[in-house]
Amino acid sequence: MASAEAHLEAEALPPISEGDMNEIRAAVEKGDLTAAATKAHEILANEEQIQLHIAVTGESGSGKSSFVNAMRGLQDHEEGAAEIGVTETTMECSPYPHPQHSHVIFWDLPGIGTPKFRPDTYLKQVHFDHYDFFIIISSSRFTCNDATLAKAIQARGKHFYFVRSKVDQDVSNERKLYNEEGVLKAKGKQATEIRPQRYDEMAVLASIRQDCERNLARLGIRSPQVFLVCRDDFSMMYDGPRLLKTFLDDLPSEKKLSFLRCLAITSREVVRQKKKELMKYVWLKSLASCGASAVPIPGLSTAVDIAILVTSLKEYCRTFGLSEESLQKLAEQVNKPVKELKAVIKTPLHHEITKDLVIKLLTKSIGSAVQYPLLVLKVIPVVGWVIGSLASAAISFPTTFFLLKNFLSDAAADAERVLQKALEGTTQKSHLWS
Ligand SMILES: Nc1nc2c(ncn2[C@@H]2O[C@H](COP(=O)(O)OP(=O)(O)OP(=O)(O)O)[C@@H](O)[C@H]2O)c(=O)[nH]1
Ligand SMILES: [Mg+2]
């Protein structure tokens, strides 16, 4: 476990209402720790119920279902994947919850502009209000239907994103015009005037992006932004990482954690963002664990609700891909023995989180709680100082606080090491969001 002191920087608050915060503060000031813990419980339970509905739309055959599968980390052939095909396949709005985080739901919508789904009635037919934001996909130039749809979404005050799919095909087609050394083969005036003499993938991508943006501007979309993706290695390649970051930046703060939970660990930045968001909830979890269900821990002078801690540690493992299933999947993806990935992990895996393990970790973190109680009060905003004045919480609160905080930091560090190991010796680079 990392030292307690190392992680003691002032914590940001989770996105909870002022009313909820005042209720907690008032309960603690009255010395009613049970009421404060019950409120913390309620806030956490509500957070877990937050759903995120993401609509994926666009013309028939543009790659919507493939995109939904990519976002859910599924190959097209895997169980539970959306049906894909070269003929029109998606005829109704189909929900696809993320396999590990079912509160994030991707909606595979039917293509716009087919006889059954006319542009003027489309948004009503697909129940517009249901979605948090829209992704409009095109595999070539965006059409008039796409632009009409974007304007209608914008007029109703929601975000939309233009995604240009199948960019791997364009890159591969363009590459064929160059020889193995990357020198342009085509000699015609047409080819040489519009292409550089040496192959340059970034230039190819920039030109597709500019073409899409120009075409959207012509259709009346102001300052359009287009993201180029392909379904394979979606979150690592082309504009995939930038697209995910943009979704995250645009989401209201109360929905960020839901989205972050389901992001694959593809960069150190993803790990950092997940950790940062989860950290905001640590003090609430600690508070909830001091509530009515807290029971004395044999051998420790503290009473704690162990079940909350078990659930929280399991959540950290799931969010950072530290489970047998996730590691196995990653090992297959990068073609490495799972043993190699596991060798860099220092924290217990998801299935190893038990009541006994938590009691062992509590014993360790009680040392930090005794050693740094004042620091805890300093870094936990709003309620820290009042909690410190309550005898019943004086030890259990900082003890669980340190346990959760340290486990979270260690799990994040493990996730970074696993990522590094997974990418070692491959040509794939971890993309940073920048
Ligand atoms: N090379 C390549 N092919 C893709 C990509 N995305 C989708 N495809 C292929 O494009 C075809 C259509 O993909 P779908 O995902 O079924 O398209 P859709 O928009 O859901 O189609 P409908 O449901 O009929 O409206 C399939 O053959 C996919 O394999 C991609 O990024 N790269
Ligand atoms: Mg489809």
Image (cartoon, rainbow, N blue to C red):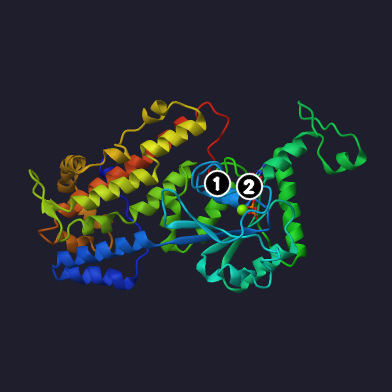
* Residue 364 appears in the figure: yes
Report the front residue among 151 and 83: 83
Residue, disc 1: 70
Residue 166 picture location, percent across and down:
67, 45
Residue located 64% across and 69% down the image: 122
Q: Is residue 79 left or right of residue 185?
A: left
Amino acid type for the residue under numbered disc 2: Val
Query: Mark 1 packing: few (<14 Cα in 10 Å), some, or many (20+)?
Result: many
Q: Residue at x 37, y 36 (%)?
A: 324
Residue 17 is drawn in which quadrant? bottom left
Q: Quadrant of the N terminus?
A: top left
Residue 279 x %, y %: 34, 52
Residue at coordinates 52% horizontally, 26% vertically from top-left?
Answer: 425
Residue depth check, mark 2 versus mark 1: number of the one nearer the observer: 1
User: Whole-percent x and y of residue 304?
Assistant: 15, 52
Residue where numbered disc 2 is placed: 229
**Which of the two residues, 390 or 241, is positioned nearer the viewer here?**
241
Residue drawn at x 30%, y 36% as measured from the top left: 347
Q: Amino acid at mark 1?
A: Ala
**Mark 1 CB lies closer than 8 A to ligand 1:** yes
The x and y percentages for residue 86 are: 68, 47
Q: Do residues under tags 2 and 1 come within 8 Å of each other at their CB atoms?
A: yes
